[in-house]
Image (cartoon, rainbow, N blue to C red):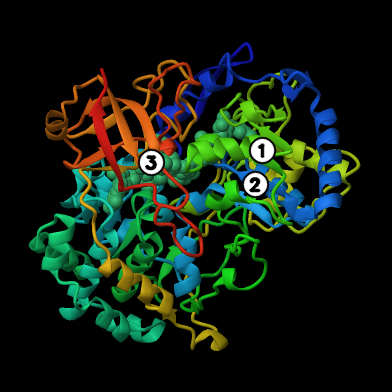
Amino acid sequence: MLVDVDDNRVIAIRGDRNNPVSRGFTCPKGRFAGQMMHHTGRLRTSLVRDRNGAFKPVAPTQAAKHIGDTLTALMARHGPDCIAMFLGTQGIFATLTNPVARSWFAATGSRKLFSTMTIDQSAKWVTAGRMGEYLGGRHGLSDADVWMLVGTNPLISVNGGAGDGVLMQTPSASLAAARNRGLKLIVIDPRRTETASRADLHLAPKPGHDALIFAGLINIILTEGLHDAGFCRDFAKGLGDLHAAVRGVTPQQVADRSGLSPHELIEAARLFARGPRGSVSTGTGVCMGPHSNLTEHLAMALNVICGRFLREGEVAPATAVLGPLAVPRAQVAPPSRSWQSGYTSRLGAGLIRGEMPTNLLTDEILQSGSDRVRALIVSGGNPALALPDAAKALKALTALELLVVIDPYLSETARLADYVIAPTMAYERADHSIHLEKYFPFPYAIQAEPLVAPPPGVIEDWQFFWQLARSMDVPLPLGGAPIDMQTMPSSRDLLAQLAQNGRVAPDQLAAAPHGLCPPDRLIHVAPALDDAQHHRLDLLPSDVASELQAMLASHDHGHTMRLIVRRMREVMNSVGREVDGLPRQPYNPASMNPGDMKRLGLCEGKRARITSVHGPIEVIVKSDSSIRPGTVSVSHGWSSGSDGHSMSANVNALTGNDDAMQAINHMPQLTSLPVEIAPLP
Ligand SMILES: Nc1nc2c(c(=O)[nH]1)N[C@H]1C(S)=C(S)[C@@H](COP(=O)(O)OP(=O)(O)OC[C@H]3O[C@@H](n4cnc5c(=O)[nH]c(N)nc54)[C@H](O)[C@@H]3O)O[C@H]1N2
Ligand SMILES: Nc1nc2c(c(=O)[nH]1)N[C@H]1C(S)=C(S)[C@@H](COP(=O)(O)OP(=O)(O)OC[C@H]3O[C@@H](n4cnc5c(=O)[nH]c(N)nc54)[C@H](O)[C@@H]3O)O[C@H]1N2
Ligand SMILES: [Mo]
């Protein structure tokens, strides 16, 4: 970014056309970071609730002392698992926040760690745990022949494509360049999204049928013998079982249920299988759907049967610069099923990648039992809006004995807190790119210096966790080395400590204000180690086979309308709503096909009520012919009333914890939800 600063204020932000990674691409939220920092709603001091329930300013050190004392007392009485932490999405944008927060939390001994990942695309973690993982890396977009995106819209979300660096940094330009050299883009999405409008083949099925569609695609490819038999033999098992399990899923059957035509399904299967290089990846439209864990497993199985992975001797971008370089290997890490061993909470949930399922957070707080959550620390998240079943989320967050929220605004969650810690924001803190580098197309690193002085009352997120650790007298290792707990280190020291196993020295990085590209750009995929040669990817473990049978036996219940998820270009979840000139409208519209609007008596810009089995929300209707008839597309992250606009509907008033809840990650269904819609006077 190129930032104009005047009188300690960010005046303007532009993309840097000379930057090799972004080439000047920015998103509106990034360009508005100055308005977000200097917004009237920005907290300039931390807050504590007084006896009358009103907020009053508190010094962060004093807050950390009191919070530490309360947590220590609670843990002494109820054991460590009575305290929980929720890590939201904004923690990612300050490099030190999550490592220091996690280090403090690990030191408490509590296992109640929650993050947004388990209410997002944790089907990907489940799939890796059940199938195993190929460690040589996936095909990349830059030399792919075919690319399939299912339930993801990277042109808006800058997500999707399994973190492919070429796609994520410059989605529009990269897709255009790839298509100009002949890449075929296949998109499966009930909406003709910005991404789908660039596709060579766009399949617009009824929502919620992706598992069936993937089963159908796999059946066509295996029946026609279009798969990569060599890769399957060397790296996978269960191919015959998988084929037998999907053999009955004919193109006609898929078409009848999903609203596609048999020949577009066959065309998609053949186009994808022809490759020879490419990849299929999914996003929230799949991972929030019914049968989400099965669907993700089948999506990955499609990559496996088509051999869409790098082989021994091929090259991958060596993107690790500040972090340690892991050598890609042509071998399989076998299924781990972490949730089957180790800690299980009284609600029956095991840990996935060290985390508890976020959909269970409210019951962890509300249901009695020895390991009930009594105190919650929220870092960079807004669970009052992000959690399914909004009413239950509110009930749970207010039932806590202690709620601490670190947030630069009085978010819907912060308003419920006992303490709100006011942190610095981007351009007020030193930072570097260690966590982002795996999403870069080639090795690149950059370090940023603070450009403006923060308001005097705020601290960096990590500093709060340092103070908390000190107050609770627990150690705080970072990157394998201890942090000084007597004198607070500088952010720069800690950033250097995090990057100590990287390949550039801190002073090299500091001397390159526009970032640097180290010379070794590529790394070869190494041969398998001897003791790993027998490991195989499991294409059809028995629980996946049962989920497949259950999916095939399930029926639609013939609801008139289905609600589907979406991202807004100008808003990041709940962030940016309040900034003048950023969102296109100061409310959360419900986009619908004009034909449905006519049929249901709805008018553009007029009020309507959407009702699910969990309750109603009020919305303003927006006509959008890109949406498949029978679906209504509404974003999340807006609240009803509290942001000053009565039509800013919280979509999670329509969702529940138990809707098609998955085993393992306890993920509920958040897309393809049956709803009814009626006009309001
Ligand atoms: N501008 C912006 N960018 C963001 C965010 C944001 O709020 N705003 N949020 C960030 C976060 S936290 C995340 S997790 C990522 C998410 O990134 P993505 O997963 O790419 O999110 P979306 O852009 O909503 O794309 C989901 C797509 O799924 C489609 N869909 C819905 N239901 C179904 C279905 O049943 N089947 C199929 N096949 N498709 C379906 C929707 O129409 C939509 O186009 O985006 C990140 N980036
Ligand atoms: N129905 C439905 N529900 C959903 C989704 C959906 O598609 N549909 N999507 C789900 C997904 S994928 C996600 S990721 C979650 C989003 O869940 P969250 O990450 O919990 O939600 P955000 O709204 O992004 O909250 C970010 C918070 O961080 C604050 N913040 C901004 N900058 C900073 C900073 O520098 N430091 C700190 N400490 N805080 C900061 C913001 O003010 C905001 O309150 O929602 C989930 N819920
Ligand atoms: Mo997310």
Instruction: Of the two numbered discs 2 and 1 on the same chain, state the one appearing first in sequence.
Output: 2
Instruction: Of the two numbered discs 3 and 1 on the same chain, state the one appearing first in sequence.
Output: 3
Q: Can residue 537 be seen from the camera position used here?
A: yes
Instruction: Of the two numbered discs 2 and 3 on the same chain, state the one appearing first in sequence.
Output: 3
**Residue 346 in picture, x, y percent from top left:** 65, 61
**Residue 105 in picture, x, y percent from top left:** 74, 50
Task: Report the residue at 33% width, 48% height from top.
Answer: 152
Q: Nearer the viewer, residue 374 or 464?
A: 374
* Residue annotated with mark 1: 399
**Residue 569 in picture, x, y percent from top left:** 36, 32
Q: Which secondary structure, mark 3?
A: helix
Q: Which secondary structure, mark 1?
A: helix
Q: Disc 2 versus disc 1: distance between alpha carbons?
A: 7 Å
**Type of amino acid under label 1:** Ala
**Type of amino acid under label 2:** Ile
Q: Disc 3 versus disc 1: distance between alpha carbons?
A: 34 Å
Which disc number belongs to residue 365? 2
**Residue 369 in picture, x, y percent from top left:** 70, 55
Task: Report the residue at 25% width, 58% height from top.
Answer: 209
Tag 2 near tag 1, CB within 8 Å: yes
* Residue annotated with mark 3: 157
Q: Can residue 276 be seen from the camera position used here?
A: no
